[in-house]
Amino acid sequence: QVQLVESGGGLVQAGGSLRLSCAAVGNFFSIRAMSWHRQAPGKQRELVATITSDDDTNYAESVKGRFTISRDNAKNTVYLQMDSLKSEDTAVYYCNMRVYGDWWDYDYWGQGTQVTVSS
């Protein structure tokens, strides 16, 4: 059984910063790709940022230069540093990890954390 536990969301003024964390807890062998997604009210879930096991990163155009994804493999944790926040960044943010066991692999999702940016 594997769970992804998110933390760090909240209310912030436009121009401010927040840091999200997502830790994988349970029995597994390794984690490869990690990513953050978000879903705003009335919109589809969208990919925000990804990071591979080689620390290669990719970002949605809308967050490039403002958000930074990173990972700590020793803690099985992925982070999303969000700076220069805008009202349009308001959404529920979800982490995702591709987790591998001895003979299995599976995509796990966090429970979601609300980020609200006031203008």
Image (cartoon, rainbow, N blue to C red):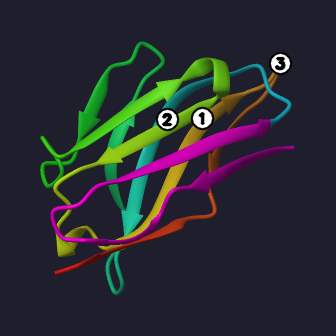
**Image quarter (top left, top right, bottom left or bottom right) of the C terminus:** bottom left
Secondary element at image label 3: loop
Determine the CA span between mark 3 and mark 1: 14 Å
Residue 32: name its quadrant: top right
Residue kind at label 3, given as amino acid type: Asp
Relative to 73, is 17 on the left or the right? left
Residue 6: name its quadrant: bottom right
Residue that label 2 marks: 34
Q: Residues within 10 Å of mark 3 (few under 14, many from 20)?
A: few
Relative to 23, is 15 on the left or the right? left
Above or below, 76 relative to 87 = above
Secondary element at image label 1: strand
User: What's drawn in magenta, residue-wise?
Assistant: 1-25
Residue 97: name its quadrant: top right
Secondary element at image label 2: strand
Q: Residue at x 65, y 26 (%)?
A: 75
Labelled pair 3, 1 in contact (Cβ < 8 Å): no
- Disc with the residue nearer the chain's start (2 vs 1): 2
Labelled pair 2, 3 in contact (Cβ < 8 Å): no
Above or below, 53 relative to 45 = above
Residue 98 tag number? 1
Q: Is residue 84 magenta?
A: no
Labelled pair 2, 1 in contact (Cβ < 8 Å): yes
Residue 102 tag number? 3
Residue kind at label 2, given as amino acid type: Met
**Image quarter (top left, top right, bottom left or bottom right) of the N terminus:** top right
Q: Nearer the viewer, residue 104 or 31?
A: 31
- Disc with the residue nearer the chain's start (2 vs 3): 2
